[in-house]
Image (cartoon, rainbow, N blue to C red):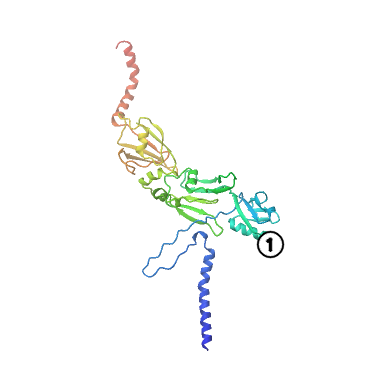
Amino acid sequence: MTRFSLILRGVSTLGAIASLTAAPGVAWAETLPLSTEVDQGPLPRPGQLAAPMAEPRLPEAYVLGPGDRIRIDIFNIPEFSGPENGVHEVLVDGTLALPLAGAVAVQGLTLAEAQTALVTSYAPLLTRPPQLTVTLLAARPVRVVVAGEVNRPGTYTIELEAETSGSGSGNPTARQWPTLTQVIQEAGGITQQANIKAIQVRRPHRQGDAMVTASLWDLIRTGDINQDMRLRDGDTIVVPKAVAVLPEESVAISSANFSPAAMPVQVVGEVASPGGVTLPANATLNQAILAAGGFESSRAQSSTVQLVRLNPDGSVDQRTVDVDLAAAANDTTNPILRPNDVVIVDRNVAAAAGDTLGLFLRPLTPLAAILRLFGF
């Protein structure tokens, strides 16, 4: 065997090995969702720590759908272009009804992809390749789903208002997509059992749903505005349930704008103004007692109270709480309350004895009044 044939055999063997190792990578890249494609960068040198991988991101490009209004401009063909002839709305079936080209499917396409599809549709019909641009004039309402630990889970539709330039032309210059906190506000705010450190946002995509995790705790503690992400039509927000929420965290969360502004609580028994009180979200037991006017000094058992709580599953919990009006929020002496909790303030020993004695003496009261009329 000649040296030249040996070289050829070695080249073919290396080519086969390269094809075997490259094929899985190509297939993986073709099926990888857009949100998880990250640049892993160069490999670290010996003794050097590997750089952390980039966090996955949601696809930001706007995709067209029924209700979107777009403008098509074809260079040097005014019959199909401009504000009079080039404005079209995506129909309910996801297509555009265009003159000459007919129905063109654009649902799920970005503006750049729609432009390519329109060029492909018009090219066989024109004498020269069309120079075409697509502009979004009015976006359809954003329809999102909110699930999990919010007060009113469900589907919400948010209209987008386009800002216009100050020239009076009426042309839209910018649109503000709703943020994560705005949508949670629409859903009534978070519950007291919400885990705001791991809120999931899912976005539909042609290559598979993309998902990221947002931490509103980082938003309110460090001011990380990137956690309050902009949402798109079709997004799903899931607020998970927390295993445990520290009292100091509850107090901090209660002042955030995505928490409910107020909650109803009942304070009954020996307080100055028994009945329903409205408290800030995540208020404490001490706040409820003080909102009801405080203890009735001569009758209340101020050392302990009863806390009654109706659970979401219909069961009822009742426990005795040792009261310390000077304590900060804690689970033992000043617990965080939930909506519709009932605080019961019992009578002290003297008040209970006086009420019992009055019960026995009540039948004798009319007789004593009659005797006083006759001078006895």
Please identify the residue farthest to the bottom as the structure is shown.
Answer: 1
Visible in this render: residue 253? yes
Location of residue 263 with respect to 228 vertically, above or below: above
Location of residue 57 with respect to 253 vertically, above or below: below
Quadrant that contains the C terminus: top left
Q: Which residue is mark 1?
A: 128
Which of the pair 75/343 is nearer the observer? 75
Which of the pair 269/75 is nearer the observer? 75
Q: Residue at x 50, y 54 (%)?
A: 202
Which of the pair 84/299 is nearer the observer? 84
Visible in this render: residue 98? no
Location of residue 9 with respect to 196 vertically, above or below: below
- Image spot of residue 22 (x, y percent): 51, 71
- Image spot of residue 189 (x, y percent): 46, 44
Q: Specify the amino acid type for callout 1.
A: Arg
The picture quadrant where one finds residue 267 is top left
The picture quadrant where one finds residue 322 is top left
